Image: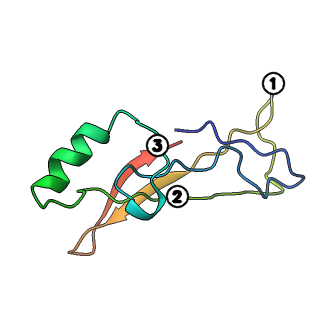
Amino acid sequence: MGGCFSDVKGGQQAIGGTQSRPTDAHNNKNNGGHNDAIDFFYKSRGFNPLFTQLELSLSAANLIDRDITSKSDPMAVVFVKKGDGKLEEVGLA
């Protein structure tokens, strides 16, 4: 996780973007990527991809500096709401 930095004042723009999915027929730009054989295998048997790409964009401003030796280290925690309404932590950065 992480590796997404901004050079825009106020941290309003992510650097890095997203990769296209190899199963997107309308936008297939992977140019012979490593998923072509797997993609063909599943599509030839009538299976759809079993994943969904999701992009999150988080920003923060005017954080209080509470560290002594460096700037504060903000943290983000990602939760998924289950069908029964309970939250499950799936990641943090």
Left or right of residue 72, residue 89 in this image: left
Residue linked to disc 2 = 55
Residue reaching furthest right?
A: 9
Q: Callout 2, which amino acid?
A: Glu
Residue 13 vs residue 77, the one in the foreground: 13
- Mark 1: which secondary structure? loop
Residue 15 vs residue 43, the one in the foreground: 43
Q: Callout 1, which amino acid?
A: Thr
Label 1 packing within 10 angstroms: few (<14), some (14-19), many (20+) = few
Between disc 1 and disc 2, whose residue precedes?
2
Q: Residue at x 23, y 56 (%)?
A: 50
Q: Is residue 36 above or below residue 54?
A: above
Between disc 3 and disc 1, whose residue precedes?
3
Q: Callout 3, which amino acid?
A: Asn
Residue reaching furthest top?
A: 69
Disc 3 + disc 1, Cβ < 8 Å: no
Q: CA distance from mark 3 to mark 1?
A: 44 Å
Left or right of residue 31, residue 7 in this image: right
Residue linked to disc 3 = 30
Residue 20 vs residue 55, the one in the foreground: 20
Residue linked to disc 1 = 69
